[in-house]
Amino acid sequence: MARRRIADQPTSRLALWARRLALFSLTATVLAVIIVRADMLEIRPALATVAGAMSFAMLAMVLALGSFVPIWREGTEGFGRALTAMGIGIALLAYPGYLGFKAYKLPAISDISTDPIEPPAFVEVVRLRERDANPTLYAGLYAAEQQRAAYPDVQPLLVQATPQAAFDAAIALANKRKWRVINARAPIAGRREGYAEAIARTPIMGFRDDVVIRVRTDPDGARIDLRSSSRYGRYDFGANAARIKSFLEDLEEQISDAAPEKVTPAPKKAQPARPAPAKR
């Protein structure tokens, strides 16, 4: 008896290409992040690579949606491949979409300072920034007004500690956060303020942002100012303000924990009254 061969169900070519493009965009994005974090690629070519990957991810989602029609009508295979492409596309586009929403809500500034009137100045960072990078000079009063409206809680930190103790705590916290300190100058009472420059990295892409820490004498102890600035781009999506607030909150807690506890003196015992001398 002759055997009848059942033809395999055809697979949707749209679903096949949707998954291929989605995997390609995922691979390109991961490689761009790894290369930037390894300091092998600067931000502009990395962003161009990621932008291209996002375009392929969007195209993969369009093809996946188109493949659902023949899969539903004709019963062709490829539903799993289409779902995979959709999942990868949504995962890759979710974060850029979130950043786009934040850029719409926040002002177009990328340099935040706790003292916008007299912001801490960059010194060593000036020679590290490329010519096409953002300027190291603070943008001025207009940027200060935008910052005050968007981030009213970005304020200097006043602590009841000596400037030297505050400076040492700030440097220790910067090292704990894996910031690369490139310039540090301890304060000297009556002669100079404490000053340090550091390079921080963004959490996902690992782009470099520059930070200045300044410690001055205050009547009640020390005043700590911070400035955080992105090297590229008009928008920082709130990253610099979040970095400053988080750092100062941790620094205040660290200095408070290190301060010696005040011991309340025990009340003095009442001395017995001496008898009045007898009158003669």
Image (cartoon, grey):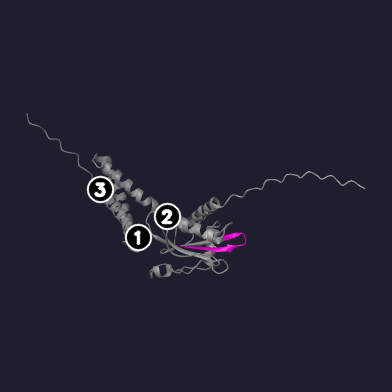
**Label whose residue precedes the other's in the sequence (2 or 3):** 3
Which image quarter: residue 158?
Answer: bottom right
Disc 3 designates what residue?
A: 14
In the image, what residue type sits under mark 2? Answer: Leu
Neighbourhood count class around disc 1 (C-alpha, 10 Å): few under 14, some 14–19, many 20 upward: some
Disc 1 designates what residue?
A: 47
**Label whose residue precedes the other's in the sequence (3 or 1):** 3
Which image quarter: residue 96?
Answer: bottom left
Q: Quadrant of the N terminus?
A: top left
Under circle 2, the secondary element is helix
Q: Nearer the viewer, residue 265 or 45?
A: 265
Disc 2 designates what residue?
A: 99
Position of residue 149 relative to residue 272, above or below, is below
Q: List x then y, in percent, for residue 272.
A: 78, 43
Neighbourhood count class around disc 2 (C-alpha, 10 Å): few under 14, some 14–19, many 20 upward: some
Residue 214 inside the magenta-drawn segment:
yes
Please give the range of residues in magenta. Answer: 210-222
Alpha carbon distance from label 2 to label 3:
30 Å
Residue 35 inside the magenta-drawn segment:
no
Q: Nearer the viewer, residue 136 or 280?
A: 280
Q: List x then y, in percent, for residue 202.
A: 41, 56
Position of residue 4 relative to residue 30, above or below, is above
Alpha carbon distance from label 3 to label 1:
28 Å
